[in-house]
Image: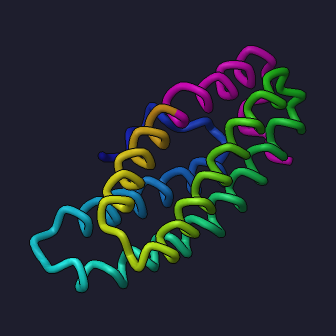
Amino acid sequence: MLWKDKYELGVPVIDAQHKELFRRVESFLQALRSEVSWDEKIPKINETLEFMKGYVVEHFHDEEEYQRSINYPGYQAHKQIHDGMVNYVLEVSKQYDQSNNNEDLMQQFGGRLMAWLINHVAAEDQRIADYAIEKGVRGNER
C-alpha cells in the first residue's frame, strides 16, 4: 500500500498528513503480517491505536477547515464520513482494550483501515481537489 502522487490534493498540510497516515497504516499492516509472535506485535499495535486516535481527529479537523475555507459544497457529507471513521477507531480501540488484545479484531481493523484510507483519499478527497481546481482555489489553506 504505497502512497501515490495522484492522491495529492495540492494542499501541502493535508497532503503531508495523508502521506503520514499511509506510512503509519502500512507500518501497522507490516507488523500485523510479520512472523513474530502476537505478544511481540502488541507494542506496535498499541502505538498505532494511540496514533490513530489523535492524528485522525487532527487531520480531519484540518481537512474540514480547508473545505469550509473554499466553501466546498460536500462539506457536511464529508464531515459525516470523517465522524464515522473517528467513532470506528475509538470503538475498536475500546473493544481491543476490553478483549485483552484480540488479534482477530486487529486483523479486521487493519484491513478496514487500509481499504478506508485508499478509498477515502482516492475518491472522496479527490472530489475536494476537483472542486478546488474548478473554482480556482486549489492550494489555498485556511
Q: Nearer the viewer, residue 67 or 27?
A: 27
The answer to which quarter of the image holds residue 37 is bottom left
Q: Position of residue 79 (x, y in %)?
A: 77, 38
Q: Report the side of 50 relative to 99 (left or right).
A: right
Query: In this orientation, which residue lies closer to the viewer: 139 or 56?
Result: 56
Farthest residue in the left direction? 35
Counting every numbered tag in the picture gives 0
Q: Quadrant of residue 17?
A: bottom right
Residue 58, horizontal then vertical, whole percent:
72, 61
Is residue 141 within the magenta segment?
Answer: yes
Residue occupying the far front of the picture: 99
Rendered residue at 55%/75% (across/down) = 50
Tell me where the magenta segment starts and ends, as one range.
Answer: 120-142
Location of residue 52 in the rendering, given as x and y in whole percent from the top left corner: 56, 65
Q: How is the image coloured?
A: rainbow
Above or below, 69 relative to 128:
below
Residue at image coords 81%, 36%: 67
Is residue 118 within the magenta segment?
Answer: no
The residue depicted at 77 percent of the width and 28 percent of the height is 77
| For residue 37, above or below residue 17 | below
At 88% from the left and 37% from the top, the residue drawn is 68
Relative to 26, residue 136 above or below:
above
Decide which of 140, 117 is in the foreground and name it.
Answer: 117
Q: Is residue 94 left or right of residue 11?
A: left
User: Is most of the magenta stretch helix, strand or loop?
Assistant: helix
Residue 22: x and y in percent read 43, 53
